[in-house]
Amino acid sequence: MSMFCFQCQEAAKGTGCTVKGVCGKEPEVAGIQDVMIYFLKGLSVYANMAKEHGIPTPETDRFIQEGLFMTITNANFDKARFIEKIREGFLLRIKLENEIEAAGHHIIKAELPEAARWTAYTPGEFERRAQQLGVFQMTKNEDIRSLRELLTYGIKGMAAYAEHAGNLGHVSDKVNAFMQKGLAATLDDGLGADELTALVLECGQYGVEVMALLDKANTGKYGNPEITRVNIGVRSNPAILISGHDLRDLEDLLEQTSGTGVDVYTHSEMLPAHYYPAFKKYEHFVGNYGNAWWKQREEFEQFNGPILFTTNCIVPPLKRATYADRIYTTGSSGLEGAMHIPGRKEDGRKDFSAIIEHAKRCAPPVEIEKGEITGGFAHNQVMQLADKVVEAVKSGAIRKFFVMAGCDGRMKGRNYYTEFARALPEDTVILTAGCAKYRYNKLPLGDIGGIPRVLDAGQCNDSYSLAVIALKLKEVFELNDINELPIAYNIAWYEQKAVIVLLALLYLGVKNIHLGPTLPAFLSPNVANVLVKNFGISGITTVDEDMKMFLGQS
Ligand code: FSO
Ligand code: SF4
């Protein structure tokens, strides 16, 4: 086996990628990602020690978030960048060690886990380390392995959201402390299934906290999302396509492209940026181009201009692709051969001049669609419509809401979600967030008394908005339990941010979530059983069967 990875929904054969990732990850990159995670777990041991001695660790907190984010599916395919980053981490570890010692605590290194002690200098040493770190080598117990991975993936998703919030100056020490406690716990052979299960559930608690933090960061800076019609056609200027989730990067890009004659379009998960009032003032912020991430190979050819990835999901271009030299990455994203735009210094701006100059030399985008899509139904906007929504539920005009948040992906079985949306009766409303929406956000599903039948709250992290809406409705209807609401959950997952969203929903007490298109390969039968027994989690079947089940006709 040249690699092993089973962290996402597209794990080969539903069990794991062993030769090369379905995502395009080469074994060398998979290996160095394993090393990065191992290193971060060891660094967390130091960070925990520092915190115990009252030493603040902001630099390490940020480093751990970035390192984790780099290993999320489709985020970073640049092996050299991982080595460089881990080397920076070694220096950080020495600094922490010195600070802890200076605070009067003597570290007995021999008592630390190996992950906190090892060092590598040459690429060969990194490679040898990678060979020792396969998930099957770390423990022989499949339930412990499953729980450790579930916890690690939840923490990866948490790190991504914490990083975005941090870019806007919002930091939670509690969230960082939990991430480090959780990572260090995965090294502790003394922890059994019960302790690890408790940590997985606690992870959901901090998942809610980090999504609330990011919501506050985004809405505090850019205003509350409002109902918006987004153009999906094109204009005749050269343009830049911005993908990923980072709104701060978008802000910098919009500022720097103002008055240059270069237009800006969003791609995939950046679409919801159009819903924020602060971005509406940019006349050259034209619309959204294309669909969910996995269609990028076709769509980027036709876009003609440079593409900026602020985060995942990158699909490495084929050799014959004409757009490969138009790809730019920044933040935690990376791709070998693509130009990486460095981070901002302190509170400065990122320098996007290279991509803007590149755009000026390019032809305008080819129109692949025309029309508009509507979104902007985050919690504040929906609450302004609360009277209308409550009335529609009371009168029976709305029979049921379906939360269909999450991710899209290339698996054929995901047609299920388009068919499911089409088959839903006309007195039902879809609540969505994340790139899952592209499976049905262009269908003519109409509205119910002016309330659109697809309410898009935003990015995957805005699933938080859907939870806030559910909690508010529970209050309005004076119910004791969120599960008494007429809301069903039919969620699609792909990568590790979806894992933290799921754990957050479980923490909030949501039961009977249907998760598809397949259940995670990293859940052992026993761990899956715990989720089924305690939370009623299940998979999906066929549209017909599921429709009957959801609408209580089976
Ligand atoms: Fe999608 Fe990719 Fe947002 Fe993910 S673009 S799949 S869960 O990165 O983060 O929804
Ligand atoms: Fe396979 Fe997903 Fe891992 Fe990529 S991230 S190697 S597709 S399991």
Image (cartoon, rainbow, N blue to C red):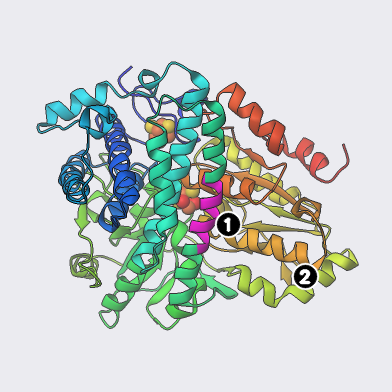
Q: Quadrant of residue 71?
A: top left
Look at 77% across and 65% down and name the residue there.
475
| Residue nearest the observer in this picture, 464 or 144 | 144
- What segment carries the magenta color? 203-212
Q: Residue at x 51, y 33 (%)?
A: 196
Relative image position of residue 18 (x, y in whole percent) = 37, 22
Instruction: Pick whichever, 87 or 486, lies toward us.
Output: 87
Residue 242 in the image: above or below residue 91 = below
Tell me: is circle 2 under 8 Å from ligand 1: no
Q: Position of residue 282 (x, y in %)?
A: 39, 81
Q: Position of residue 447 (x, y in %)?
A: 74, 67
Image quadrant assignment for residue 486: bottom right
Residue linked to disc 2: 389
Against 201, residue 458 (above or below) is below
Are dots 2 and 1 in contact, CB under 8 Å?
no
Q: Tell me the residue at 84%/72% (across/down).
A: 391
Quadrant including the N terminus: top left
Q: Nearer the viewer, residue 151 or 233?
A: 151
Residue 332 in sight: no
Q: What's the residue type where badge 1 is placed?
A: Ser
